[in-house]
């Protein structure tokens, strides 16, 4: 082979190998199911946010507006583990939207339009989301870490419930590959944590500490153990 031709062939072979190296590996069925779930839940978030805007611009009662705000916020919190990992700047903006100005319709409208803009940006940034198992476990571990700092206010408890639901939804896609006893024990921890969030009327610092010790910390450890048992990738 002529030297010039060899150099050209070697150059393109190198480029091809680099491109191939950058392509995501084939997704596991669990990761693919998690991404499908994300897509469905993202459409729920879009729907709730537009209904919230309609409630604001339609001058609905304060109680109706507050409920729709909460529904929108809950829909986002379920997806926060994805947003926080794949689009942290947008996640920070949406996480900061934790209250509304009920006595100022113009301000509420501006806030809501801004939130919808952030949601649209999140949709564009994750439109072709291809996530590996390792990335999903990174995201779950990050979200459980955030949960350890949850606030004891009514909104803080509701946010924690939504975030926990998101982590649980992703973890459930992996449960069938685990030891049955460990899988059952982890599911029970999720259910008991949800029950405590639902039934505790007033969260004080003692209740917060109890929730962290009995549920958040063990669940965080079980997610790490799930990853280790399934031999899933390196951490970020």
Image (tube, rainbow, N blue to C red):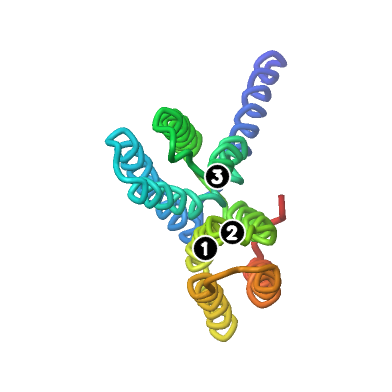
**Disc 1 marks which residue?**
161
Drawn side of residue 221 relative to residue 199, left or right:
right
- Residue most extreme to the left: 58
Whether tag 1 and tag 3 are in contact, CB under 8 A, the answer is no
Whole-percent x, y for residue 102 in the image: 43, 40
Give the quarter of the image for residue 88: top right
Q: Which residue is drawn at 59% across and 59% down?
A: 153
Q: In the rendered view of the protein, which quadrant contains the N terminus?
A: top right
**Res. 103 image quadrant:** top left
Alpha carbon distance from label 2 to label 1: 12 Å
Q: Rate crowding at label 2 as few (under 14), some (14 to 19) or many (20 or more) other CA atoms within 10 Å.
A: few
Number of residues whose C-alpha sits closer than 10 Å to that of mark 1, classed few (under 14), some (14–19) or many (20 or more): many
Residue positioned 65% across, 16% down in the render: 5
**Residue 64, image x, y percentages:** 33, 49
Mark-to-mark CA distance, 3 and 2: 23 Å
Task: Please identify the residue farthest to the bottom as the structure is shown.
Answer: 181
Q: Which of marks 1 and 3 is in front?
A: 1
Kindly state the secondary structure of the residue where label 1 is placed: helix
Q: Decide which of tag 3 and tag 2 comes sooner along the chain.
A: 3
Q: Nearer the viewer, residue 213 or 131?
A: 213
- Answer few, some or many: residues within 10 Å of disc 3's Cα (few below 14, many 20 plus, some between 14 and 19): many
Residue linked to disc 2: 153
């Amino acid at each position: 082979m002529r030297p010039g031709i060899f150099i050209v062939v070697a150059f393109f072979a190198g480029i091809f190998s680099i491109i191939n190296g950058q392509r995501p590996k084939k997704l596991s069925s669990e990761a693919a199911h998690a991404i499908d779930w994300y897509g469905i839940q993202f459409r729920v978030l879009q729907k709730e946010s537009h209904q919230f805007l309609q409630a604001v611009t339609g001058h609905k009662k304060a109680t109706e507006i507050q409920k729709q705000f909460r529904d929108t916020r809950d829909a986002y919190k379920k997806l926060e583990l994805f947003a926080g990992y794949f689009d942290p700047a947008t996640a920070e903006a949406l996480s900061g939207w934790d209250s509304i100005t009920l006595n100022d319709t113009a301000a509420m409208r501006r806030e809501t339009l801004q939130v919808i803009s952030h949601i649209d940006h999140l949709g564009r940034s994750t439109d072709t989301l291809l996530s590996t198992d390792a990335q999903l476990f990174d995201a779950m571990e990050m979200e459980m870490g955030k949960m350890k700092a949850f606030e004891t206010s009514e909104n803080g408890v509701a946010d924690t419930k939504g975030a926990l639901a998101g982590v649980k939804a992703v973890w459930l896609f992996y449960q069938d590959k685990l030891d049955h006893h460990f899988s059952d024990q982890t599911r029970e921890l999720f259910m008991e944590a949800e029950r405590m969030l639902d039934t505790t009327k007033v969260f004080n610092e003692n209740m917060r500490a109890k929730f962290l010790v009995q549920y958040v910390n063990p669940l965080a450890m079980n997610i790490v153990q799930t990853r280790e048992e399934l031999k899933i990738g390196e951490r970020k």
